[in-house]
Image (cartoon, rainbow, N blue to C red):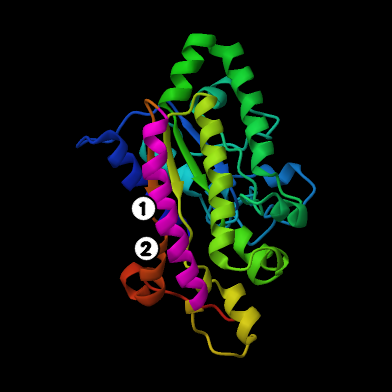
Amino acid sequence: MAPSILLLTLVAVYSISEAATLPKFSGTLIFGDSTVDTGNNNYVETVFRSDHPPYGRDFPDHVPTGRFSNGKLIPDLAAGILGMKETVPPFLNRSLTDDDIRTGVCFASAGSGYDDMTTAATGAIPLDEQLELFKNYITRLKGIVGEEEARKILGGALIIVSSGTNDLVYNYYDIPTRRYQFNTISGYHDFLLNSLQSFVQELYNLGGRLMAIAGLPPIGCLPVQIVTRYGSSGTPACLEDQNLDCQTYNKKLKRLLTQLQPSLPGSRIIYADIYDPLSDMVSQPQKYGKLLLKEEGK
């Protein structure tokens, strides 16, 4: 998923800057789920871990770091392209340096979502606890650079939020806990977006001003969703009903962010589209390079 999220972040970056050259951010601050977790789950009790092979095989030194990827994630790629640093460390890493704190860290946790019930099932770090970690970060940042400089760093940092997929997968589609509570998927969308709005408001209250909020991917094209419905020997086709749900959610999210920004003076909040790039990758994979399939044991 990293290439599409890189695309959305660069779009957000250019939109925020409205300049012909790459903008200068003071750092990167990352919140959300496995799409952006650079290793925080290494330090919590959860089954969602990626600190083992084959993860990390294309990462520098070919080591698994807790990223749910063969290599770098969007926080790392964005920070590198923007000239800040090559990788963004997880905040729970006990070896963080003062420079790590100044230039930004990651608070995301694989398995999390906007719905607290999601992390109750996965053991991941809920978004409200990610905010508590952010508050601890701010305290540490102020101790390093002082109150005024900390305010500038927070206001000039690129904040990326990527979440929501786990909520639908674990609480609505595959384990229908919330389906019993909400009569329609639209009602659950509204519930999630209300939580998202509160999250963005709190980020703003804590000093964040420049935010890229990711929409949902085409969940119906995730292999786990296809196999759950059709079985491993079934039809390898995307679930269009789930994809339509994601498109509906994304439209609501775009409207919400448009309405929210004027109420937060000095903010710039960008909707980051990951649905269309991923859909294009699924439908036209040849556009993105050669796919090599390796049989087990060869």
Q: Is residue 73 left or right of residue 49?
A: left
Q: In the displayed structure, would residue 39 be above or below residue 136? A: below
> Based on the displayed image, in which of its 4 quarters is residue 3 positioned?
bottom left
Name the foreground residue: 184 vs 18.
184
Relative to 269, say whether 5 is above or below. Answer: below
CB atoms of marks 1 and 2 within 8 Å: yes
Provide the residue designation for mark 1. Answer: 7
Residue 63 is marked as none
Give the mark, 1 or 2, whose residue is nearer the N terminus. Answer: 1
Label 1 SS: helix
Query: Residue type at mark 1?
Result: Leu
- The image position of residue 156, as x and y in percent, is 41, 25
Q: Which residues are magenta?
A: 241-264
Identified at 57% across, 75% down, the residue is 223
Which residue is at 38% across, 26% downward? 265
Residue 245 highlighted magenta (yes or no): yes
Q: Nearer the viewer, residue 287 or 219?
A: 219
- The answer to whether one can see residue 156 in this image is yes
- Residue designated by label 2: 277
**At which x and y percent is residue 79?**
43, 38
In this view of the protein, can residue 163 be seen by the observer? no
Q: Residues within 10 Å of mark 2 (few under 14, many from 20)?
A: some
Q: Position of residue 15 (x, y in %)?
A: 29, 41
Is the C terminus in the top left, top right, bottom left or bottom right quadrant? Answer: bottom right
Residue type at mark 2?
A: Pro
Which residue is drawn at the image coordinates 54% and 58% (left, top)? 189
The kind of secondary structure the magenta stretch mainly shows is helix
Magenta residue check for 273? no
